[in-house]
Image (cartoon, helix red, strand yellow):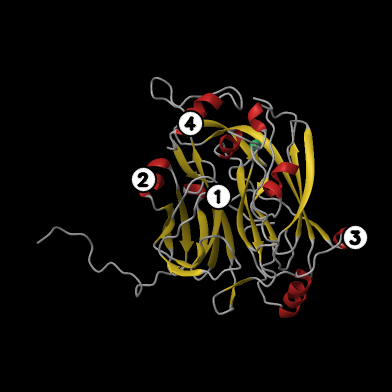
């Protein structure tokens, strides 16, 4: 499995993405996010800085912060409005090939992961920050890996600069020029690209505008909590008896998985790595009147999130914070290879299902999460007038 011939990128990048301008800065660690106060002075200074390409010496003089990576669905602690100018944000991702149970019936997959989770941890920076990413491939792994970040500008999204064999690590840097939510994923080359991605090797990065999120009128949008939902399609092969096959080592399922992948029909479509990862005791929580940001990524397959009982107050379906968000959506669409951001302020307590509203994918394949919301019920918004009784 190690370093197969398939591992070479098959083509050079054909498009040189336009270098865009913007502004910068921070990151740190946890679900609750505070301090969304607008600081227009800081934001102005930031955007001014944004238009300028910095020299290596200037980049070297920037403040450096280390991002404390956290497990999804948490986001690293961060400021919604950047404080100060651009920074260099150090991010470390350690690749772990590990056996994971992905369904309640014990179905397993040898997952390929960034930092041991599916999806990998969310990275949060501000526009025009420099992300200095170290990718570590411990010698306990058996495969070559790399990382392609859709937020970056340059050949293969960093994929060409970051190939690491077991026992190696690599560091590269990119400027986060475009604000938005973006997928990152492993892309070692050829058939290994989809193989790694559908074995869990993907995650997301959020590049906030320096001045924070805005509505169509330029009014600030802030959130009280943020969650990261990473949707994953898996292609697990069955044996002759119709049971999902199990394997002893990472990569051993390669031939079988390729056959299932070629059908384009996933065996499982789940949130955060496994059926039930965001339900029951793992349900997401919020309170009435809290505004929640949900970043939802799908690195490979299309999806259509819907919050049953709520709405998308503001939704950046394509993930670009440079663009005006859609508003008041019932369901939104995320093409494979995209991370989207949605904002909702809860109005009622209770249990909400957050699903892929292809309901077959939600219920039969696994793509369901639960929000448990505390607070006081509002009869004016909804009330049962008469309990079920026999028809007269
Ligand atoms: Cu990989």
Q: Earlier in the sequence, mark 4 or mark 1?
A: 4
| Residue drawn where x is 69% and y is 66% of the image | 79
Left or right, residue 32 beside residue 255:
right
Q: CB under 8 Å between callouts 1 and 3? A: no
Q: Secondary structure at mark 1?
A: loop
Number of numbered discs present? 4
Q: Label 4 vs label 1: CA separation?
A: 21 Å
Asked whether mark 1 lies closer than 8 Å to ligand 1, one says: no
Q: CB under 8 Å between callouts 4 and 2? A: no
Work out whether residue 309 can be spotted.
yes
Q: In the rendered image, which quarter contains the C terminus? A: bottom left
Q: Which mark's residue is nearer the viewer, 4 or 1?
A: 1
Q: Label 2 vs label 3: CA separation?
A: 54 Å
Q: Could you classify mark 3 by the number of other residues whose Cα lies within 10 Å: few (under 14), some (14-19), or many (20 or more)?
A: few
From the viewer's perspective, is residue 306 above or below residue 365?
A: below
Residue 163: quarter of image: top right
| Residue drawn where x is 79% and y is 68% of the image | 52
Q: Position of residue 111 (x, y in %)?
A: 59, 34
Quickly name the residue at label 1: 337
From the viewer's perspective, is residue 194 above or below residue 381?
A: above
Q: Earlier in the sequence, mark 3 or mark 4?
A: 3
Quickly name the residue at label 4: 236
Q: Earlier in the sequence, mark 2 or mark 3?
A: 3
Badge number at residue 360: 2
Q: Secondary structure at mark 2?
A: helix
């Amino acid at each position: 499995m190690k370093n197969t011939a398939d591992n070479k990128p098959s083509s050079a990048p054909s498009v040189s993405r336009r270098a865009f301008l913007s502004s910068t800065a921070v990151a740190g660690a946890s679900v609750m996010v505070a301090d969304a106060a607008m600081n227009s002075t800081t934001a102005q200074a930031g955007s001014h800085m944004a238009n300028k390409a910095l020299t290596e010496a200037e980049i070297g003089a920037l403040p450096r912060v280390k991002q404390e990576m956290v497990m999804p669905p948490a986001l690293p602690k961060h400021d919604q409005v950047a404080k100060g100018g651009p920074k260099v944000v150090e991010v470390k991702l350690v690749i772990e090939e590990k056996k994971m149970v992905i369904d309640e019936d014990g179905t397993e997959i040898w997952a390929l992961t960034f930092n041991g989770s599916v999806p990998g941890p969310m990275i949060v920076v501000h526009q025009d920050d420099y992300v200095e990413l170290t990718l570590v491939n411990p010698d306990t792994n058996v495969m070559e890996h790399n990382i392609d970040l859709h937020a970056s500008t340059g050949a293969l999204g960093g994929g060409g600069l970051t190939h690491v064999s077991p026992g190696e690590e690599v560091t590269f840097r990119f400027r986060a020029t475009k604000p938005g939510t973006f997928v990152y994923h492993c892309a070692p080359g050829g058939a290994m690209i989809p193989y790694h991605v559908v074995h869990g090797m993907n995650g997301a990065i959020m590049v906030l505008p320096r001045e924070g999120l805005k509505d169509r009128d330029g009014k600030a949008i802030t959130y009280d909590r943020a969650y990261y939902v990473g949707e994953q399609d898996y292609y697990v092969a069955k044996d002759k008896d119709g049971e999902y096959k199990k394997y002893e080592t990472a990569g051993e399922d390669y031939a079988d998985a390729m056959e299932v992948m070629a059908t384009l029909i996933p065996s499982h479509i789940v949130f955060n790595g496994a059926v039930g990862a965001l339900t029951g005791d793992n349900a997401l929580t919020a309170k009435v009147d809290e505004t929640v940001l949900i970043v939802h990524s799908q690195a490979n397959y299309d999806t259509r999130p819907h919050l049953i009982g709520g709405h998308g107050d503001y939704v950046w379906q394509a993930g670009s914070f440079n663009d005006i968000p859609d508003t008041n959506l019932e369901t939104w669409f995320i093409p494979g290879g995209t991370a989207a951001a949605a904002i909702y302020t809860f109005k009622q307590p209770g249990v909400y299902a957050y699903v892929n509203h292809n309901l077959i994918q939600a219920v039969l394949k696994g793509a369901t999460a639960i929000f448990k919301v505390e607070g006081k019920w509002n009869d004016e918004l909804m009330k049962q007038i008469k309990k079920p009784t026999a028809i007269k």
